Amino acid sequence: MALRPAWEGHLRLSLVTCPVRLFKAVGEGDTVRFNLLHRQTLNRVKQVWKDPEDGTVERKELVRGFQVERDRYVVVEDEELKALKLESTKVIDIERFVEAAEIDRLYWDEPYFLVPDGKPAQDPYAVIREAMSGESRVALGRLVMTNRERIVAIEPRGRGMLLSTLHSHDEVRSQEEAFEPIAEVKIDRRMVEIAKQIIAQAHGPFDPAEFNDRYKEAVRALIEAKVEGADEVVHRPAPGPAESNVIDLMEALRRSLKASPEQEPKRDTPVRRAAAAPQAKRGPAATATGGGKGEARSLPRKGGSHAARRAVR
């Protein structure tokens, strides 16, 4: 399936301009999505807008309103928003270059692949990319996405470039306010040295494939077991921290240093528990399905397309 661009326009460095497209660098993965159903009928429910005086309102009758005070709104039409054509709506104008290390990690937001749009864009795109390669600087610019102007950082990445949206200053909260309750304590340097040894023992390369979503896997296993007709699905929770009578921090650090990685508890997965009755006597399990754009794909229903809808619990 071809990727859909999230934005299309031009990248400009001084007098050098080239058409570009943006593609999301991070997707949702194999996300588990649920639909809301009526418990009694298992029919999928629909969202309905209601006016307190006129009742149900059609989607086409809705307008945007900004609340200026209680029960008073300023209405803004789509045409009025489209008329606010900032240059950054269709052009990413590189304004300056900064050291990448100068941008606090709190400001980095969502990454996008920035690619040339069409054959004529290849040469100017390559010139900009190569000029930035080998430098520790990133380019800063602006673009309008999802009805707001965003600050963006652009950097070379392999054969292409990576564009990352940045949070604005008013979006980043003060760390002083968050850390204010943290007390000043006097630390035993011996404890710090032991903690550093524990950190050194756990040091290793970063492999994102090792950090899978175990909760999502457990949910999928639960759904698959229900579809296959399991009467009960039991998920054994991961064991919590081992109970210990150690209340001395130094002793806890020493024990942690002696513990080997092999002693860590292993995660568990859902287990299917079948009923005592023979499988042949159970009716086919069915999953409620619904139509609509963007809904989750339902697992196949056993017993044919006309199988009776019933709750699978």
Image (cartoon, rainbow, N blue to C red):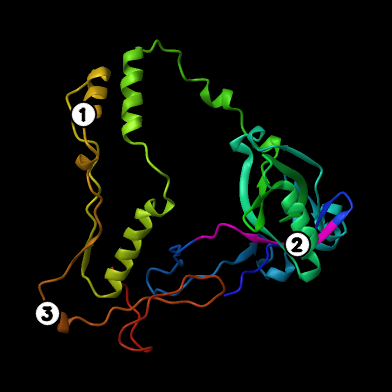
Magenta-highlighted residues? 17-28
As shown in the figure, which amino acid type bears the numbered disc 2?
Val
Position in image of residue 249 (x %, y %): 27, 19
Closer to the camera, 231 or 51? 231
Mark 1, residue position = 258
Residue placed at 74% from the left, 58% from the top? 126
As shown in the figure, which amino acid type bears the numbered disc 3?
Pro
Q: How crowded is mark 3: few (under 14 residues within 10 Å), some or many (20 or more)?
A: few
Q: Earlier in the sequence, mark 1 or mark 3?
A: 1
Provide the secondary structure element on which disc 1 rests. Answer: helix
As shown in the figure, which amino acid type bears the numbered disc 1?
Lys
Residue placed at 56% from the left, 57% from the top? 26
Provide the secondary structure element on which disc 3 rests. Answer: loop
Q: Residue 20 carries which label?
A: 2
Q: Residue 278 carries which label?
A: 3
Q: How crowded is mark 1: few (under 14 residues within 10 Å), some or many (20 or more)?
A: few
Residue 149 seen in the figure? no
Q: Distance between the residues labelled 1 and 3?
A: 51 Å
Q: Earlier in the sequence, mark 1 or mark 2?
A: 2
Q: Which mark is residue 203?
A: none
Position in image of residue 95 (x %, y %): 82, 43
| In magenta segment, residue 80 | no
Closer to the camera, 21 or 30? 21
